[in-house]
Image (spheres, rainbow, N blue to C red):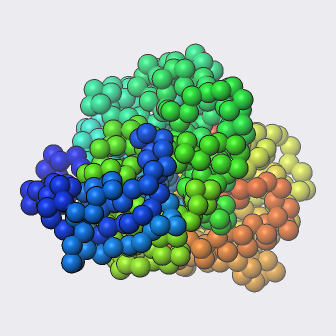
Amino acid sequence: MGFVHDGRRRIRPLTISEFRSLMRVSKGIEEADVYFCGGTVCNVYSGEWINANVAVKGRHIAYVGMSDQMVGENTRVIDVHDQYIVPGYMEPHAHPFQLYNPYTFAQFALLHGTTFLVNDNLTLYLTMPIERMEEFFHEAGQWPVKMTWWARFDPQTSSPESESLFDPVRIRRLLGNPYVLQGGELTAWPQILAGTNDELELNLWEAGNMGKRVEGHMPGASIETLSAMTAAGVTACHEAMTGEEALRRLRLGLWTSLRYSSLRPDLPVLIRDLLLSQADFHRMMMTTDGATPAFLERGLTDEMVRVAIESGLEPMRAYQMVTVQPAMYYGIDGEVGGIAPGRIADLLLLSAPTIPTPEQVWADGKLAASQGELQIDWKEPDWAYYGQSGLLLDWLTVSEDFYLQEDEKVYVIDLENPAITRIREGITADDLTGILITRDGKHAVRSAVRGFARRLDGMASSFTASGDFMALGRNPAAMQQALNRVLQIGGGIVLIENGEVLFELALPLAGKMSKRPLTELTVENKKLERLLSERGYPHYDLIYTLLFFTSTHLPEVRFTPRGILHVKSGEILVPAKVRRVSL
Ligand SMILES: Nc1ncnc2[nH]cnc12
């Protein structure tokens, strides 16, 4: 049976007896389950650190104050005299698919004190039926880290098959799902500016009328562009790279997330700029925006809070920006984001306000993690049930796939930085061959690639935004061996040199996600980066380079299943070719 929702908007609705019990505990006429005694509470509502006890009943906070009337024989009293109690952190803009998966990412988040995630749905949406995805939302909504979602309005790649999924009927349905807090992020905003996408307009119009938030994606946008997108219903944007860009957004009433991601670790600069300009931080949040495992070595939201404090932000404001402010933005501050009666008991015990990594994490009123170790059973999703049991492919590569062919027009895709490409003509001896083979094995797209890793023999990856396969290298046989291995293991990233496997990471979930814990992926990610940088990769975020080769929201040219796409003009410069041999 699919998931049917009953119209309740709370992520932890109370039964009537739980509701009555909570009230009785708050009045001191029923015993609390847990009582945190003698701590210093971070009151994100008033901006004060106050001495208070916190009583918990079931999954909720029942009382905050000096009374101990609710302490009874069966109450577990936790002495926190030398500790600080802060609300569980919220990450308002997560992409839980960067080698890690939603489950392993949530586990990592929990250990670092993040108890609420607002997640990108794109990878799930492109790989499972909508009914199944909604079932997954419901299952993940019960996790100790509360999982909520965005509904994307566009596929961020160019393929007729995926574009057809974003029709207004399906999007309206998703926007009505209680686990979906917003629409976006709106990577196809140029189509709104140009007035060329009616369906997208309808989706924005509907989201506005349903009172939904819409996340923008407007890097480098002028005030005019930002105005037009605000009029189109965008309510927040996380793309500001300078204090001035953040202010531009705030002035238009847009909530502004300051970013600390592997691709754009701008947080320290933003904080310093904004402090200098005496900006008001009330409508700002912080996000790690899909940081890759290598970047997450020191933490998630906890690390952002630390960086923000080190950059001069007052600790209370840093905590507010990762708790009550995102909760207010999403309209859920009655349930999460602070320590007050009726809120979910997601509480962190810190040793000091300047050390945001928690000693203990309490989630739903239970001890969930202590000193970085999980304290609860947490069932992994049955991935096979959700259609994620490894890519099963019925085609093979042939050697001619990996040669630039004489009858093809060949451009050079030149990486300017980890994400931005430029189009050039005239191949040099240092250029690699890059090839995309579509998921169904029917089409191939070839190009020369510059600025990647000129001493790379062969590499292949199913970690692509479009869900297709890519191979890169200077040695066609090594590229073929790498791609064959990726196909054999049902998805992953493989490097071949001198006929040997130099690196292999299986990504059995949608070809993008491993089942291994995030900390192990940090090690693999760093190893892969080292191997590539030894072979000439000059940039700093390899995983994003691989993902974004097929992402059509970035300048200037991209591999797509249709061919090499010039993003701004929408022109296919080199059409995909039908592969002569596909089994
Ligand atoms: N637009 C995007 N799509 C996928 N992952 C991302 N990480 C950051 N931005 C992203």
The answer to whether residue 289 is left or right of residue 336 is: right
Q: Residue, x 42% and y 22% (percent of image)?
A: 232
The answer to whether residue 133 is left or right of residue 42 is: left
The answer to whether residue 261 is left or right of residue 341 is: right
Say above or below: 482 vs 400: below
In the picture as drawn, the residue positioned furthest to the right comes out as 429
Q: Nearer the viewer, residue 487 or 192?
A: 192
Q: Residue 488: percent from the left, percent from the top?
A: 55, 79
Q: Residue 126: percent from the left, percent from the top?
A: 41, 54
Quadrant (top left, top right, bottom left, bottom right) of the N terminus: bottom left
Q: Residue, x 54% and y 25% (percent of image)?
A: 250
Q: Is residue 499 visible?
A: yes
Q: Nearer the viewer, residue 184 or 399?
A: 184
Say which quarter of the image contains residue 66.
Answer: bottom left
Q: Nearer the viewer, residue 24 or 462?
A: 24
Q: Residue, x 59% and y 47% (percent of image)?
A: 315
Say above or below: 374 vs 566: below
Say which quarter of the image contains residue 19.
Answer: bottom left
Q: Residue, x 48% and y 44% (percent of image)?
A: 48
Q: Is residue 126 visible?
A: no
The answer to whether residue 31 is left or right of residue 386 is: left
Say above or below: 425 vs 443: above
